[in-house]
Image: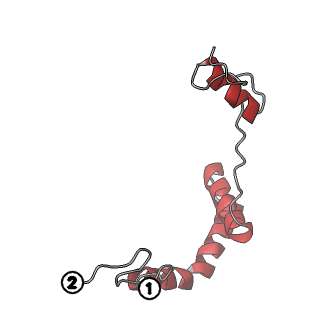
Amino acid sequence: MRGSKPGERRGGRQKGTPNKTTAEIRELAQAHGPDAIAEAARLMKSAQSEATRIAAIGLILDRGYGKSIEKLEHGGPDGDPITLEALLMARIKRKELPKPGGSSQ
């Protein structure tokens, strides 16, 4: 029995190749794509429920323009941006790091 070398694949699908079932399901779904978009557009215009109309609008926009990227901002306790200096000073305060200049007090 021969061992595999680091980074060597041992059988199976090549990375990035979808399995047969996934490919078949994608093909079936894509065949219904135009009808699904048409139904979403109909619901967007005429559904009684506002929630249904909003969901249909979101679906259409996501498919047409892509889902929006949620921007995350990280900040310190006071809302200011976290800087490397602030992180280091906090670790020095907690005595996880020595003070600059070699002094540990």
Q: Residue at x 64, y 18 (%)?
A: 93
* Quadrant that contains the N terminus: bottom left
Which residue, given by chain and number where applicable, does mark 2 sit on?
1
Number of numbered callouts drawn: 2
Spot occupied by residue 38 in the image (x, y as percentages of width and height)? 65, 75
- The extreme top residue here reads 105
Q: Mark 1 and mark 2 in contact? Answer it, CB < 8 Å.
A: no
Q: Which mark is residue 24?
A: 1
Q: Quadrant of residue 79?
A: top right
Callout 2: helix, strand or loop? loop
Q: Residues within 10 Å of mark 1 (few under 14, many from 20)?
A: few
- The extreme right residue here reads 80
Q: Residue at x 67, y 69 (%)?
A: 63
Callout 1: helix, strand or loop? helix
Q: Residue at x 46, y 84 (%)?
A: 23
Q: Residues within 10 Å of mark 2 (few under 14, many from 20)?
A: few
Q: Amino acid at mark 2?
A: Met
Near-viewer residue (100 or 4): 100
Spot occupied by residue 95 in the image (x, y as percentages of width and height)? 58, 19
Spot occupied by residue 26 in the image (x, y as percentages of width and height)? 50, 80
Q: Amino acid at mark 1?
A: Glu
Color theme of the render = secondary structure
Question: Does residue 4 appear in the picture of this structure?
Answer: yes
Q: Residue at x 68, y 21 (%)?
A: 99
Q: Quadrant of residue 84?
A: top right
Q: Quadrant of residue 97?
A: top right
